[in-house]
Amino acid sequence: MTSANPSIVSIKDAQQPQQAANKSRFQELIKNLRRNRSAVAGAVVIGFLILVAVFAPFIATHDPNLSMIGQPGETGKLPAKAPCIAILGCEQPQHILGLDLNARDVFSRLVYGARTSLVVGISSVSFAIIVGTVLGLVAGYVGGWTDNIIMRLMDVLLAFPSLLLAITIVTVRGPGLENALLAIAFVSIPIYARLIRASVLSVKELEFVTAERALGAPPARILFQQIFPNTLTPLIVQGTLGIGGAVLEAAALSFLGLGAQPPLAEWGQMLSEARNYVFTAPHLVFFPGLAIMLTVLGFNLLGDGLRDALDPRLNRR
């Protein structure tokens, strides 16, 4: 029987400590997050919203786009009907959060709005992270005129207020949820590009990167296997915080009539429809506004908790 190749055995032996170290770091991260009350609260809120978005067809009591006018059992003045809960003595067909100005069930539209807002927030931030990371890696590692060109373009984009630039982009391309998503992603790219570039500049001169370069490793391998993994910490934190901002910007665009278009259920669009009835039908404004606030708060709390948990300079004892 032939013995195993010594080189293969040595490689496996070298990988085991690294795998153990990665597992230990992950366990330490989870432990730190569990001790952070803000992170736990944010994770609970976000987890709840994700469950609502995923199981929206089972949670919603009505079709979110269906008007209750003419439906069996519906009587009286339906538009802007106040919340009606059977357990509290409501004898008419139950509408937990009432009806909007088009006699559609507010609770059902609120549930489906969670799906719309989370998809826009996560998709736009993911797109911005991918493009911004590539630009930041190239600018920070290559340097020279390439760095100057990329960063000056990012500076030009940062010179404009993000919401105003997003409004301009959507106005040019036309209103709609897809164009709002692209606009939010586009205005967020400079944030991640500058963040990654700064991380690359601090990492690329470290000893292990210099050693890889001296051994003749190709630039792509150095960039994506050595440098990029060491830039993930600030990227994860900023991305988590960015989702909350993207949800807020999407709601603002929809409020202005540039984002989600009727009859699609979206929180900002719900606020836009009811903005003139804040005193006569306050439930139409309160519930979608509360949903936006809780979503942004959840992502902000989780982002702050991740920042604390991933910061090696903090004493965890």
Image (spheres, helix red, strand yellow):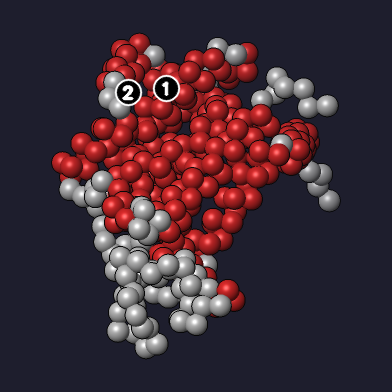
Residue in front for this viewpoint, 18 or 238: 238
Residue at image coords 45%, 81%: 93
Instruction: Give the label, 1 or 2, closer to the camera.
Output: 2
Can you say whether 154 is above or below 57 in the image? above
Q: Which residue is mark 2?
A: 158
The type of residue carrying mark 2 is Leu
Residue at image coords 24%, 50%: 257
Residue at image coords 36%, 27%: 190
Can you say whether 208 is above or below 57 in the image? above
**Quadrant in which the C terminus is drawn:** top right
Q: Which residue is mark 1?
A: 194
Label 1–label 2 contact, CB within 8 A = yes
Q: Position of residue 199 (x, y in %)?
A: 52, 20
Q: Position of residue 168 (x, y in %)?
A: 20, 36
- Direction from residue 268 to residue 315 in the image, left or right: right
Q: CA distance from mark 1 to mark 2?
A: 10 Å
Residue in front for this viewpoint, 285 or 88: 88
Residue at image coords 15%, 41%: 172
Q: Element type at marker 2?
A: helix
Mark 2 residue crowding within 10 angstroms, few (<14) / some (14–19) / many (20+): some
